Image (cartoon, helix red, strand yellow):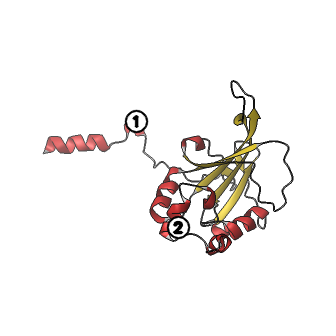
Amino acid sequence: MLRLSLLLLVLLMPLDGVVATPVTDGPVYTADGQLTFPEHYREWVFLTSGTDMSYDPKPEPAGHTMFNNVFVNPSAYKAFLTTGTWPDKTVLVLENRGGEAAKSINTRGRTQSVEVMGMEVHVKDAKLPGGWGFYGFDNMVSAKLIAKPASCYTCHESHAAVDTTFVQFYPTLVGLAEKKGTLSAAYLKEKGK
């Protein structure tokens, strides 16, 4: 019994004074409140990709092709699968890449560019005004909160399928949200239900 107790004590002791800290995949902020860029977002859960999307009723031709890829932190995804809604500390990353034609052996259609053309992050955090915030990254370091009443807030609040997020564009989640009964009244009205 003494031998087992000593073994447990040794196993529970930190190595070289290192104390284990819990790993989080949620938002991380700088001392002045900026969101730090989630540099490992490409290891997160991929939700969808869209091409040349616009929410403008009369969109002008862009003159180029843009891919929009959406990723979410794994802990938020797991919670969504259970509840049909996003938990606090959800981080959704919108990665924008240009479309390229005639690249390598491709003779038709478009592939995504290596260069990232823009990054936007949508965060659910109870500490933010209204519980959600948008961040546009000009660099891959940190970004300030986009202040309300920017159009991203009003559009998401008016048209999002679940909790100010466009789950209607996430093919693996919209059906789940419908089964869980978490689709927004605004989205159901737009859909004619």
Question: Which residue is found at the position 56% from the left and 61% from the top?
Answer: 174
For residue 178, the mark is 2
User: Which one is in front, 143 or 21?
Assistant: 143
Count of all numbered marks drawn on residues in the image: 2
Indicate the quadrant containing the N terminus: top left, top right, bottom left or bottom right.
top left
SS at badge 1: helix
Quadrant position of residue 18:
top left
For this orientation, the residue located farthest to the front is 108
Say which amino acid is labelled 1: Asp
Quadrant position of residue 64:
top right
Say which amino acid is labelled 2: Glu
Whether residue 116 is visible to the viewer of this picture, yes or no, is yes
SS at badge 2: helix
Q: What percent of the width, then of the height, locates residue 17?
A: 41, 39
Question: Which residue is found at the position 78% from the left and 42% from the top?
Answer: 65
Q: Say above or below: 183 vs 30.
A: below
For this orientation, the residue located farthest to the left is 1
Question: Which residue is found at the position 65% from the left and 74% from the top?
Answer: 189
Local packing at callout 2 (Cα closer than 10 Å; few below 14, some 14-19, many 20+) is some
User: Which one is in front, 69 or 145?
Assistant: 69
Image-based side of 6 in relation to 101, left or right: left
Sequence-earlier tag: 1 or 2: 1
Q: Which residue lies under the disc numbered 1?
A: 16
